[in-house]
Amino acid sequence: MNQETAKILWNKPAGASVYRIGLTCGNEYGQADPGQFVTLRLPKESSPLLRRPFSIHRLIKNNGELKGIEILYKAVGEFTRKLSHTAAGERIDMLGPLGKGFTVSAAIKSAALVAGGIGVAPMVFLADRLIHEGISPTQTIVCLGGRSADDVLCDTDFQTMALKTRITTENGSIGEKGLVTDALSNWLKDHQPDMIYACGPMPMLGAVSAIAKQKNMPCEVSIETIMACGVGACLGCAIKDTQHAEGYGHVCIDGPVFNAARLNLAGR
Ligand SMILES: Cc1cc2nc3c(=O)[nH]c(=O)nc-3n(C[C@H](O)[C@H](O)[C@H](O)COP(=O)(O)OP(=O)(O)OC[C@H]3O[C@@H](n4cnc5c(N)ncnc54)[C@H](O)[C@@H]3O)c2cc1C
Ligand code: FES
C-alpha cells in the first residue's frame, strides 16, 4: 500500500455520467490483483473530507511497461462530480492498492463474470488476468446487466478479449429484457464453470449467491459499502462474516472480494 500524488493522464466520458480516468501509479500496482481498489482525494478540495474507494479497472501498459491505472467511475455525488471536472495534468491523492481481490489461478479454466451497472469496473481487469492465466474464452461468459442501455458498460472491452457477453436490461432497451441473473441461470443450464465472479448492487449479489449455492458452485462477490478510512481502522464497513472470529469482517481489509458462502448473502 502506498500513498502518492498521482498525475491525471486523461479523464474522459465513457457513457451517461460515466468516465474513465487514467492515473500514474507506483510500481507496486504491477502486482495488484483484480478486485483491489484505491481511495482518492482531491488535494485542492476541503470537501468531501473522506477519501472515496474505486476499483482498479485496468492497468495501463506501454510495451509491457506499467504506466498507470485506469478507473471507471459514475458521477453520483459530490466527490465523483468534482472528479469528473478534473483534467489531464492535474494531481490527485491516491492510496492503494487496497483490500483483497478475486481468486485467479491456472486451475480456473471456465468462469461466469456477472456485473450489474458500474459493478463492471473491476471485471475488465479480472477478465484480462483470467485470459493471461489461460482461461478458455469459449467456456466463459460475461453477463452484463442494468436498468437500461445507459447502465450497460464495457461490452466492447470484453469482445476485444474474445469473450462472449450476454446483455440484459430491466426495460429491454438493449439485450434481453430481464435481470442479469436470468442470463446467468440460462447459461448455467449448459455450463459448469470453475468459478462465478460477481460485482454489483447487493440484491444482485444476493441472487447470484443463491444461484451458486443451489448449484453448489464456487462464487466470489465484490461488496460495495460506504467506507470511511479504507484501511481497517474505523469499523465503518463492517459486514456479517461467518468466517470471522468476531462474526463481522471489514469490507476494506477482509474484502472487498469475499467467498459468497461465508457472507450468507443468498436471499437478501
Ligand atoms: C471497494 C469499492 C469499490 C468501488 N469501486 C467503484 C468504481 O470502480 N467505480 C465507481 O463509480 N464507484 C465505485 N465505488 C463506489 C464509489 O466509492 C461511490 O460511488 C463514491 O464513494 C461516491 O462518492 P460521492 O461523494 O460522489 O457520492 P456521495 O455524495 O457520497 O453519495 C451520493 C449518492 O450515492 C450513493 N452512494 C455512495 N456510495 C455508494 C456505493 N458504494 N454504492 C451505491 N451507492 C452509493 C449515496 O448513498 C448517495 O445517495 C466503489 C465502492 C467500494 C466500496
Ligand atoms: S472503511 Fe474503515 S474499517 Fe473499513
Image (cartoon, helix red, strand yellow):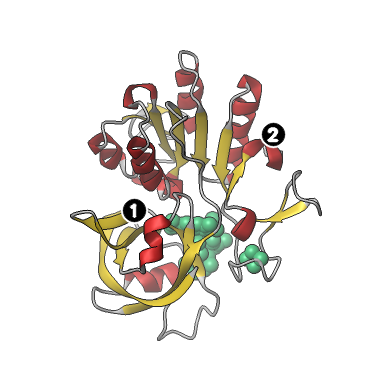
Which image quadrant for residue 79?
bottom left
The reply to whether residue 112 is in sight is yes
Residue pointed to by mark 2: 267
Q: Is mark 2 within 8 Å of ligand 1?
A: no
Q: Secondary structure at mark 2?
A: loop
Residue pointed to by mark 1: 58
Residue 189 location (% of width, % of height): 49, 14
| Amino acid marked by disc 1 | Arg
Q: In the rendering, which numbered label is found on residue 132?
A: none
Q: Please give left or right for residue 111 compared with residue 216 in the image.
A: left
Disc 1, disc 2: CB below 8 Å?
no
Which image quadrant for residue 219?
top right
Tell me the residue at 23%/54% (across/down): 64
Residue 204 location (% of width, % of height): 56, 38
> From what the image shows, is residue 142 above or below residue 258?
above
Q: Could you give the CA–CA distance between mark 1 and mark 2, rounded to whole angstroms? A: 32 Å
Residue 28 location (% of width, % of height): 41, 64
